[in-house]
Image: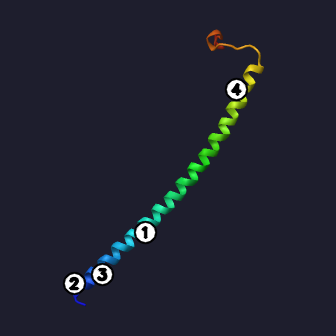
Amino acid sequence: MNDMDAHTDTDTDRRLEALEIKASFADDLLEELNRTVARQQLQIQHLQQQLRALQEQLPAAGTTRSLHDELPPHY
């Protein structure tokens, strides 16, 4: 093996190690993003349930009001 081959092997090893590090960080980031999306999906489902519950309470209140008919407290 000559100096040129040794230099190429070292360069290739460094490049391979750099790619492995980048792949590891990308994997970690992907896992974190997946956890974030899953958590947000649960929050969305919970908010949808709350919204449905509120919508079911509206007709039970009897009369519907318009915000245009209400005066702000300072009037």
Q: Is residue 74 above or below residue 2?
A: above
Q: Circle 4 — which element?
A: helix
| Residue where numbered disc 3 is placed | 9
Task: Tell me the amino acid under the disc marked 2.
Answer: Met
**Separation of residues labelled 3 and 2 (CA atoms):** 9 Å
> Residue at (45%, 61%) from the top-left corner?
26
Q: Residue at x 49, y 62 (%)?
A: 27
Does dot 3 land on a helix, a strand or a loop? helix
Q: Which mark is residue 4?
A: 2
The three-letter amino acid code for the residue at tag 3 is Asp
Report which residue position mark 1 lands on: 21
Q: Which numbered disc, 3 or 2, marks the residue that appears first in the sequence?
A: 2
Q: Which residue is mark 4?
A: 55
| Residue 54, x across and y down, in percent | 71, 28
Viewer-closest of 71 and 61: 61
Q: CA distance from mark 4 to mark 1?
A: 51 Å
Where is residue 68 drawn, in percent x and y? 61, 11
Q: Amino acid at mark 1?
A: Ile
Q: Mark 1 or mark 3: name the one nearer the start of the chain.
A: 3
Front tag of 4 and 1: 4
Q: Quadrant of residue 4?
A: bottom left
| Total tally of numbered discs in the picture | 4
Report how far apart the C-alphas of labels 1 and 2 lie in the structure. Answer: 26 Å
* Residue plotted at (22% across, 87% down): 3
